[in-house]
Amino acid sequence: MVDIERAFKSVMKKGKVTIGLKKTKKMIIDGKAKMVVVAKNCPEREEIKNLAKERNIPIFEFPGKGVELGPACGKPFAISTFAVLDEGKTDILSIVGES
């Protein structure tokens, strides 16, 4: 079992991510996202999920709110959604199969 919080912090340091609604949507549309993480209170959650599904991009639905997702990623602010562009040397993509 992958520790989700550890995986999030690891990809923030070792990989390449884009944080925020507008940037995440752009990366999905441009086909650059390898995975999308969305908090349960993301204002455009269904739209993000639909865009990702249309492009066969794996989605991880974080069970907490954005104020919980931010600290889980090691950030001192809320995060509603982020896209993984490059996982680096992390196991972040394996959490999608477990959700």
Image (tube, rainbow, N blue to C red):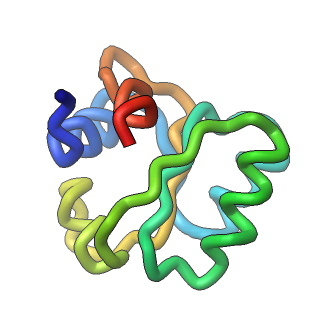
Horizontally, residue 27 falls left or right of residue 19, namely right
Q: Nearer the viewer, residue 41 or 9?
A: 41
Residue, far top: 89
- What percent of the width, then of the height, locates residue 35? 56, 38
Locate residue 59, reporting x and y percent.
55, 46
Can you give x and y, in whole percent of width and height, for residue 6 in the image? 16, 39
Quadrant the N terminus occupies: top left
- Picture quarter containing residue 58? top right
Of residue 21 and residue 14, the one placed in the foreground of this image is 21
**Relative to residue 30, is residue 67 drawn left or right?**
left
Q: Tell me if residue 58 comes above or below residue 25 in the rendering.
A: above
Q: Which residue is found at the position 23% from the left and 43% from the top?
A: 4
Residue at the limit of the structure toward the front, as seen here: 98
| Residue shown at 38% from the left, 25% from the top | 94
x and y percentages locating residue 61 in the rendered image: 45, 57
Q: Is residue 28 left or right of residue 73?
A: right
> Compared to 71, does 56 lie above or below?
above
Image quarter hosting the C terminus: top left
Give the mark count. Answer: 0
Image point 15% across, 37% down: which residue? Answer: 3
Where, by quadrant of the figure, is residue 25 drawn?
bottom right
Q: Is residue 29 above or below residue 97?
A: below
Query: Is 83 located above or below residue 90 in the figure?
Result: below
